[in-house]
């Protein structure tokens, strides 16, 4: 038996090494997370800075459970791929009279040996990774805590127990599988079958696939407006559109993989461009065959890629939202209304102030006019009206405020959550206007922004930027805001902490008379039914710390999950490719014998690998982009820069797996 | 004109104490337009010889010259070019690409490296006609009988107008009717197209379609038989020679003829 195990390890050395390496990376990640959770000292140190960090171990524990379950499913799936590959030799052993029990025991021991190798390498890697992961978490959460390698024997023992059980189960499954391998007749690989003929029905399904997929893509791109349109109609609720787009997209994607792409490749293969170039021809026929034989695997890999990129991209956009959201909410260290200023001014030492900015505004009720039936038509709310020159002055110190040019009678509306008001081909903005009923002034809307001077938290609802002349003639109550940039230091920090514990608010009556301009607007310190309110004193520091904690932790979780999903996706593709390459070895030998140059052989392998890896990546990226675009709309377009960086890193690592696969196939 | 010249060819596998001599100082030649069979018992070195001429294997010593080119100096890309332009292959297992139509299988070797010859379609039509494949060009290999598949392989071997066709047990997977039909087609190609064919076989009936049979044993030249009369007579002499070679008879000179 020992000799059999040795010979098996020798024969399947490359595949086994890859299997161990991939599983070891997953074990390393699991160990690093578990060690992080069990490091009480680290979180106790973090607790000194903010309370949000107290939730981190619980969140990480959920991450650990999800990652562990996923790893176990991944190992079981990989084992299925690996054991199927050995079915032929096992059937020969059985044919020669080796008892099934003995082969089963051999496979069990092999599984345990592979498990032991995985754990040893995984723990060594995990120990190194633990410091890196802990530093990443602390950095993302903006916590000034230092950390070393996380040595947690308890975590190791727990994982040893779990994985011993997992590998034992895998060994037992393999043992049972042996008993079901056909004996007494030659084990046959699945018959390849003829390339599918392009029949009328296939063409119909292929067309339906494209129509559904493109339709769902258009629907997903315009989801907000589509959902609004449906919610305004008699047909149903807006959320139904979400499910409908998702369902149609999934069915469309499956049909495209099942019918549309094979039909397309079958048509393309007739073109002389392919027929007269062996590399192109063999690449395309191979793709066609994969689409026929492995359509489910390709479809699932695409969904997995979509999920992974969505998880990573969403984490990134939420993190970016956290960062941008703070600046959008409060653009300076301290922003206060006159009442807010009154409550805190005696504590604020003038020496701590680096810069002071005053923004005069006037409060007015306004009514929005859009096209009939479009979102926002007839909206009545309160506007802080701002003169263009004041806006431009603030724009010099506040990043993100766009440069504006206005003519008399024109205005720019700033609104928080502007997704419904955006100019799209489904929701074209023409001749939008705002009237201020109290004064009878009317402004043509030039654009809609989501950036407020000094931050949205200083406003009751929306802002309206008008020319200086229009501002001068507007008779309305004044509502100035003051922003301060503070110096750093312990005393300033103490002031900020104290000020953040006070809760002072300004209120504005939201009665119908106030909104229609029949009654003048008045600020008060007491709340009435239907009042609009805002915090009179707003501080950036505490909000930023909270956001960093929350979204930093979130980004850490999704990066880890994305990493695990990506390793799984790429490993499945890699293993499948290697196994198929083994099955197709004879075809390659024929082509080589017929005189195909080595360069041509390599080109075919490279193209095949690129297509098999690229197709899920490309489709997955596009799907994920639509989902992230939807989130981005709801989060008021916080920007895609971090999303692009993270998805690019993902694509690079994924491409690395592709390159490794091509190299291994070439060597096989 | 001499197409194949094998001189003192030796191939030794393994090293030190575990050495197996597959070819041992083997020498023979094949002239243009000949249909030569290579016969010998199992382990005689037939496949090694074929692989060496196909540049899939390299000799330990000795030289092989095909169409005036010495194979020993070839680089990887030159070997591929030589196989593509000078050789045509017919394998026992057909080795057709299942995803390609018959037409694409036949023209495949000409599309490996651009440019594609202008007369590609004309060549395809000509060999499809010669081998009776006109009605099957749009079918896939799995839709053909075994005999038809081997004819497709023969057309693929012919399409590049090679100097030499190497056939490795081409009738090994065929029933007797299909085998006879294929051999008649090969004879037709040999006679009408003046193609030089070197066929490895262990079957005397298959070998009887050749003009000359070279017998090898233990990697060395053993004897050869040349056809001078009717096929039945040639067949009998092949059987006789097989009996001699299997019975441990002594080596004969190259002049044995019938």
Image (cartoon, rainbow, N blue to C red):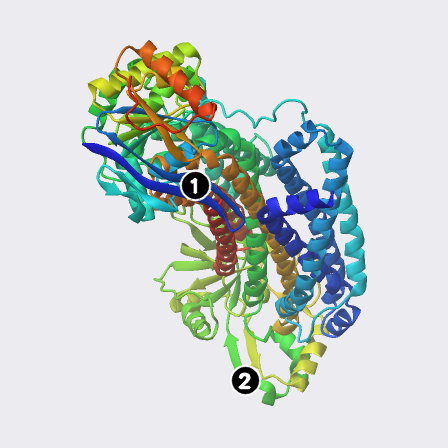
Residue A129 image point, x, y percent: 65, 64
Left or right, A569 with respect to B166, comes to right
Q: Quadrant of residue B251?
A: top left
Does the image show residue B117?
A: no
Q: Badge 2 local density, few (<14 within 10 Å), some, or many (20+)?
A: few
Compare residues A226 and A272 and report the one nearer the observer.
Answer: A272
Left or right, B167 with respect to A99, comes to left
Compare residues A135 and B144 and report the one nearer the observer.
Answer: B144
Marks 1 and 2 close (CB-CB < 8 Å): no
Q: Residue furthest front?
A: B250
Circle 1 SS class: helix
Q: Residue furthest bottom?
A: A351
Circle 2 SS class: strand
Compare residues A598 and A216 and report the one nearer the observer.
Answer: A598
The chain to which mark 2 is attached is A
Residue sitting at 28 percent across and 25 percent down? Answer: B255
Residue A274 image point, x, y percent: 31, 34
Q: Which residue is mark 2?
A: A354
Q: Is residue B236 above or below residue B170?
A: above
Which disc number belongs to residue A608? 1
Kindly report which numbered mark, 1 or 2, lies closer to the viewer in this rendering: 1
Q: Is residue A267 above or below residue A491?
A: above
Residue B47 image point, x, y percent: 42, 33
């Amino acid at each position: 038996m020992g000799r059999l195990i040795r010979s098996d390890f020798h024969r399947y050395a490359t595949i086994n090494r890859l299997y161990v390496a991939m599983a070891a990376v997953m074990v390393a990640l699991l160990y690093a997370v578990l060690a992080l959770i069990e490091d009480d000292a680290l979180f106790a140190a973090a607790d000194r800075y903010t309370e949000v960090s107290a939730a981190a171990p619980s969140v990480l524990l959920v991450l650990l459970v999800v990652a562990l379950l996923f790893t176990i499913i991944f190992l079981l799936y990989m084992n299925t791929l690996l054991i199927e590959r050995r079915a032929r030799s096992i059937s020969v052993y059985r044919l020669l009279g080796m008892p099934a029990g003995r082969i089963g025991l051999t496979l069990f021991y092999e599984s345990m040996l592979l498990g032991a190798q995985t754990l040893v390498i995984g723990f060594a890697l995990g120990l190194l990774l633990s410091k890196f992961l802990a530093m990443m978490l602390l950095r993302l959460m903006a916590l000034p805590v230092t950390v070393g390698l996380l040595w947690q024997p308890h975590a190791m023992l727990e994982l040893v127990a779990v994985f011993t059980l997992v590998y034992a189960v895998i060994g037992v499954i393999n043992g049972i599988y042996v008993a079901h391998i056909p004996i007494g007749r030659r084990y046959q690989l699945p018959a390849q079958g003829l390339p599918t003929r392009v029949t009328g029905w296939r063409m119909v399904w292929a067309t339906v696939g494209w129509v559904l997929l493109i339709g769902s893509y258009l629907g997903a791109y315009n989801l907000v407006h589509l959902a609004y349109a449906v919610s305004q109609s008699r047909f149903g609720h807006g959320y139904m559109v979400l499910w409908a787009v998702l369902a149609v997209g999934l069915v469309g994607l499956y049909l495209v993989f099942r019918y549309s792409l094979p039909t397309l490749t079958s048509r393309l293969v007739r073109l002389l461009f392919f027929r007269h170039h062996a590399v192109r021809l063999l690449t395309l026929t191979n793709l066609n065959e994969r689409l026929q034989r492995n359509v489910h695997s390709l479809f699932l890999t695409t969904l997995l890629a979509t999920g992974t990129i969505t998880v990573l991209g969403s984490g990134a956009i939420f993190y970016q939202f956290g960062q941008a959201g703070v600046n959008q909410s409060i653009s300076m260290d301290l922003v206060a209304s006159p009442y807010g200023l009154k409550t805190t001014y005696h504590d604020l030492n003038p020496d701590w102030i680096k810069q002071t900015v005053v923004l005069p505004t006037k409060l007015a009720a306004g009514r929005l006019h859009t096209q009939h039936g479009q979102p926002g038509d007839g909206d009545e709310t309160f506007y802080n009206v701002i003169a263009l020159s004041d806006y431009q002055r603030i724009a010099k110190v506040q990043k993100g405020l766009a440069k504006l040019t206005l003519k008399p009678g024109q205005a720019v509306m700033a609104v928080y959550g502007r997704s419904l008001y955006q100019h799209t081909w489904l929701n074209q903005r023409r001749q939008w206007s705002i009237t201020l009923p109290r004064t009878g002034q009317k402004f043509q809307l030039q654009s809609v922004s989501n950036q407020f001077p000094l931050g949205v938290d200083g406003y009751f609802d929306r802002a309206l930027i008008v020319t200086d002349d229009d501002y001068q003639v507007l008779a309305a109550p004044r509502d100035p805001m003051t922003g301060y940039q503070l110096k750093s230091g312990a005393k300033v920090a103490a002031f900020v902490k104290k000020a953040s514990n006070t809760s002072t608010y300004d209120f504005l009556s939201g009665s119908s008379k106030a909104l229609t301009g029949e009654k003048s607007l008045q600020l008060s310190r007491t709340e009435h039914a239907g009042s609009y309110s805002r915090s009179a004193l707003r501080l950036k520091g505490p909000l930023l710390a909270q956001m960093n904690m929350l979204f930093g932790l979130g980004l850490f979780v999704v990066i880890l999950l994305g990493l695990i999903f990506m390793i799984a996706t790429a490993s499945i593709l890699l293993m499948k490719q290697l196994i198929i390459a083994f099955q197709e070895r004879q075809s390659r030998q024929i082509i080589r014998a017929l005189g195909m140059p080595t360069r041509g052989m390599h080109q075919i392998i490279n193209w095949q690998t690129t297509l098999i890896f690229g197709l899920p990546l490309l489709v997955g990226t596009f799907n994920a982009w639509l989902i992230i675009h939807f989130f981005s709309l709801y989060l008021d377009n916080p920007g895609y820069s971090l999303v692009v960086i993270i998805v690019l890193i993902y694509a690079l690592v994924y491409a690395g797996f592709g390159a490794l696969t091509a190299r291994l196939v070439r060597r096989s | 004109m001499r197409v194949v010249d094998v001189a003192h060819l030796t191939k030794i596998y393994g090293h030190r104490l575990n050495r197996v001599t597959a070819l041992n100082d083997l020498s023979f030649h094949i002239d243009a337009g000949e249909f030569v069979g290579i016969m010998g018992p199992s382990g005689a070195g037939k496949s090694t010889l074929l692989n060496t001429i196909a540049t899939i294997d390299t000799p330990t010593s000795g030289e092989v010259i095909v169409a005036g080119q010495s194979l020993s100096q070839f680089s990887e890309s030159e070997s591929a070019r030589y196989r593509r332009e000078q050789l045509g292959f017919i394998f026992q297992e057909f080795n057709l690409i299942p995803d390609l139509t018959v037409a694409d299988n036949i023209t495949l070797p000409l599309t490996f490296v651009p440019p594609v010859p202008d007369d590609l379609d004309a060549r395809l039509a000509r060999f499809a006609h010669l081998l009776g494949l006109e009605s099957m060009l749009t079918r896939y290999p799995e839709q053909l009988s075994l005999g038809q598949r081997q004819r497709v392989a023969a057309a693929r071997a012919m399409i590049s107008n090679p100097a030499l066709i190497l056939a490795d047990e081409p009738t090994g997977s065929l029933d007797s009717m299909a085998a006879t039909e294929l051999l008649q087609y090969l004879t037709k190609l040999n006679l009408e197209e003046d193609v030089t064919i070197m066929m490895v076989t262990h079957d005397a009936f298959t070998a009887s379609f050749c003009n000359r049979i070279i017998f090898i044993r233990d990697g060395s030249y053993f004897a050869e038989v040349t056809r001078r009369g009717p096929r039945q007579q040639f067949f009998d002499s092949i059987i006789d020679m097989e009996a001699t070679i299997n019975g441990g008879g002594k080596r004969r000179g190259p002049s044995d003829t019938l």
